[in-house]
Amino acid sequence: MKEAVRGAEATIVDVCGGVGVGGVALALVLRGMGIGISIRLVVVDLRRTALERAKELSGEVLGSEAEVVEADATEVHKHISGASMALMFGYTSPHFCPYELLRLTTSVAASLKSSGVFVLEEHDRFGDILMRIGYRYVVPEHADEDMITLSIHSRYDHLRGMTESFREATGLRGGKDASKALGSRRHSGDAVGRIQGC
């Protein structure tokens, strides 16, 4: 971080900053590092009421109001250039589809100086959302009149964003259940749930 904030002034951009909690906290951390720089905080969000609160909060905590930009996060580069750091904090990234997130990161990168840093708090969507809420343990992969194929998730690796699963097919002919195991063939689903190596 020290490399990113060298010089007399450091500009921090809080992307999708809402009321500016993340940007204010980062500004406090940088002040606490004792590197003697002036910090300019810019909060970018689409919500005008949140931005008004960001000005109040930054004024109360930092002693000066943040600059606010009411804009789409995928167009940060149109409003800011030469920033030292950008931050996207909180459960924000799931609001963007993969294409929008790519546009957002590209826009933020274009708003930074060459030594700038983008701090993105990303959540493990597959683990946090799908594995803990509903999509968990037993997943029907295929079903028709003759056969149902189920994936049984046995373990989730949070570091790799992968599930370890077993598949079993159950026949439904003649009204009787006849189970035939496909063996303990393990397969992994990546962070968006695709199946690999089956």
Image (cartoon, rainbow, N blue to C red):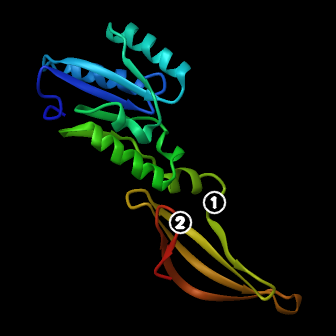
- Residue at horizontal 46%, vertical 66%? 190
Residue assigned mark 2:
193
Q: Which amino acid does label 2 sit on?
A: Gly
- Residue at horizontal 26%, vertical 23%? 29
Q: Residue 177 carries which label?
A: none
Query: Is tag 1's residue or tag 2's residue first in the polypeptide sequence?
Result: 1
Give the alpha-carbon distance from disc 1 to disc 2, as whole Å: 10 Å
Q: Are marks 1 and 2 in contact (CB under 8 Å)?
A: yes
In front: label 1 or label 2: 2
**Residue 155: % across, % down:** 50, 65
The quarter of the picture where the N terminus appears is top left
Viewer-proximal residue among 194 and 112: 112
In the depicted structure, whether residue 141 falls above or below residue 61:
below
Residue assigned mark 1:
135
Viewer-proximal residue among 127 and 38: 38
- Residue at horizontal 31%, vertical 31%? 80
Label 2 Cα neighbours within 10 Å, binned few <14 / some 14-19 / many ≥20: some
Viewer-proximal residue among 171 and 196: 196
SS category of the residue bearing label 1: loop
Q: What residue type is labelled 1?
A: Tyr
